[in-house]
Amino acid sequence: MLPRTHCTGSVEENFYRKLANCLSCAYFHARCKADGISTTLFIAQQLQQHHSRTLERIYAKEESYIEILNRLPDGLFTTDHEWRITFFNPAAEKITGFTAHDAIGMYCKDVFKNSICEYDCALKKAVAAGHDIHNREYEIRNIEGRKVPIICSTSAFRDKEGRVTGGLEVFKDITAIKELQEEVARRERKYRRIFEGSHDMIYTTNLQGRILDINQAGVELMGYRTKQEMLDGLRAEDLYFNPRDREKLVAAITKAGFVKDYEAQFKTGDGSRLHVLISSRIYENAHTGEVELEGIIKDITRRKQREEVIHQRNRELSILNSIAVALNHTMNLKNTLKVTLEKVIKVLQLERGGLFIIDHDAKRIHLQARHNIPEAINEKSDQLVFSDRILMQHLIEDQKSLSPEAAFPPFHAHYHAAGAQTNLHLTCFLITFKGRAVGFFGMNIPKSRVLSTHEAHLMGSIGNFIGGVIENTQMMLTIRRHRQELRRLTEKLFQGQEEERRRIARELHDEAGQSLTAIKLGLDRLEEKHASGMAMRQEIKEIRDMIQRTATEIRQMSYRLHPTLLSDLGLEPALALYFKEIQKRTTIDIQFRIIGFDRRLGVDMETILYRFSQEAMTNALKHSGAEQFSLSIIKSYPRIIFLAEDDGVGFDTHIIGRDHQSLGLLGMRERASLLNGTFILRSEPGEGTRIRIELPLDEEVEND
């Protein structure tokens, strides 16, 4: 049947209304009669076709609905009025473990296996309540007996008369959600344990400064009794020693999103100061949407105190190091005391001060070093007046011994300087050495300034140290003066020794030589008078030979004492002749050389080098048993190098000064020291001996 009819020219969508129109139409009946078709048969065929198409559309819709339900991620089933399952989607199969084939026809309570279905069935409750029930949570057991948490929504089906025809239940497996909730709860408990169990302060505040939460460690750190007392009565800025520091912290966090180890000072409930390190971040509260701050605050007050102690120790060591450097640089006591005073004033952060030395012999006090203090009118002690006269007498005049102390109590004095209208008030700290007052520091300390205990101990330590420095420096200066005097005496001794040798050599050459010549002439006259007697002539000859030998020995002795060749021709000819005479009497092989001299040295230097050569040769002949001896004198500007070696038996060099045979070597060392030279001796038993002497060369003393 076509929707458009031939009689009306209109389209009728309703099948039954159109059918009624056709049955009442004359044209319709005329056509049926002309075509030989029964009207009843035609209507039956049309009804059959219409019903078939309608059922196909219904089935198609049902299949699409079922496809949609099957694709749902949540479990879904429907029941009849007896609560038997009529539909069971794949998601329900997955959650319960039952297949749709097994579940359809079962009671829902048998599928869920939960006792709550017996006395508090959700479907029955929805029927009783007359409305749907949503998001009800409970546990079911799947086909394997494992508990599965679900969230369920139920709805009852009713017909037009309101009778219950079945029900619908949609449920979702919330195992993952429950696990996440448990994990969140576990982490919350863990966080709470950390929060409350931490030894550091943990807090949360909002940007406006309201304290939202604080742990017990924070309550105790800040010196309050309860958390509520802080939450109700304080704001975040009240915790800071300087409230503006909180604004700086918030600005830093807002800029970077967080801060780490931000140093600040807090104020406790009793007003005490705390040094803290703050690590904090900014975040948005997911529940309230408010911007909040949370962080950890660590108390570093003790660390700060230790750092201050270390800083003080470093300053003390810096002063002591400066003193040591000054001492290494120079033995000038005045410079050392000036450096010490400047360092002490810098460490104590003062403006003026002085260092006074007590002269016990003269019973006076001298201003040895000063900083921003004018000079005294004169050196009299009355320019410095002690507040305690008895103490002044005790330190200066009585010279009583003091018991050792790490630090002596400070005392006070007034200093009157030239041109000053008022006296300068000084706080004084003793400088001692072995119980004896050596001096004191006089510091101009403002009345508002109170030295700490550590600073007082620092002054005591420096006083004890500088006392030893003063005494040791004075002792070293005394030793240096004595050494200089000893050196001058030794030099005079060597000079006197050489002069005495010259005198004895001259007397031997002149007086003894003349006497022996006169004796020889007398023997010649005696021989002429008694020429006939053979016995007499023989005796005279023997006496003449004896006189000749004596004259030769005297000449040799005179030459050894002071060789005239050394004065006349110089060092090289004198030593060449000396070694030549020795080689005539011995079998030792002597190697001698002088290098680099284009003119003669001074008389004293030539004499010293000649004596060194004599002593080295004598030791090789008498003690070493050497077969070879070498001597080199080298001019290597700005020094002269004297090098003597032999291949003898050697000896232990530690015996020098304890054995009379080593006195010659000791004399060589002393002479080299007098000339600011160096003396190096190397020898071991069986290894020979090597002597190296280096003397400074002074061109001015060389002869042209």
Image (cartoon, grey):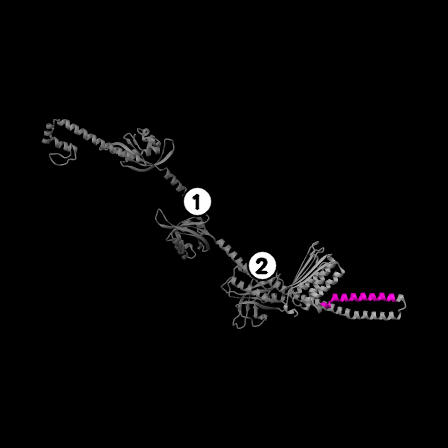
What's the CA distance linking mark 2 and mark 1?
Answer: 50 Å
Whether residue 120 appears in this view of the structure is no
Residue 149, image x and y in percent?
A: 36, 36
Using residue 157 as the reference point, say whether residue 489 is left or right of it.
right
Q: Is residue 550 magenta?
A: yes
- Disc 2 residue type? Ala
Q: Is residue 456 magenta?
A: no
* Image marks 2 and 1: residues in contact by CB distance under 8 Å: no
Q: Quadrant of residue 650?
A: bottom right
Q: Residue at x 15, y 28 (%)?
A: 43
Q: Nearer the viewer, residue 95 or 533?
A: 533
Quadrant where the N terminus sits is top left
Q: Nearer the viewer, residue 227 or 696?
A: 696
Secondary element under disc 1, as helix, strand or loop, is helix
Residue at the extreme right: 532
Residue 467, image x and y in percent?
A: 60, 62
Segment tinted magenta in the rendering? 537-565
- Disc 1 residue type? Arg
Whether residue 350 appears in this view of the structure is yes
Residue 77, image x and y in percent?
A: 30, 33
| Image height of 282 relative to 701, above or below | above
Quadrant where the C terminus sits is bottom right
| Image height of 173 relative to 509, above or below | above
According to the picture, the residue beneath numbered tag 2 turns out to be 406
Report crowding for label 1: few under 14, some 14 to 19, many 20 or more residues within 10 A (C-alpha).
few
According to the picture, the residue beneath numbered tag 1 turns out to be 193
Secondary element under disc 2, as helix, strand or loop, is loop
Report crowding for label 2: few under 14, some 14 to 19, many 20 or more residues within 10 A (C-alpha).
few
Q: Nearer the viewer, residue 343 or 528?
A: 528
Q: Nearer the viewer, residue 515 or 600?
A: 600
Residue 456, image x and y in percent?
A: 54, 60
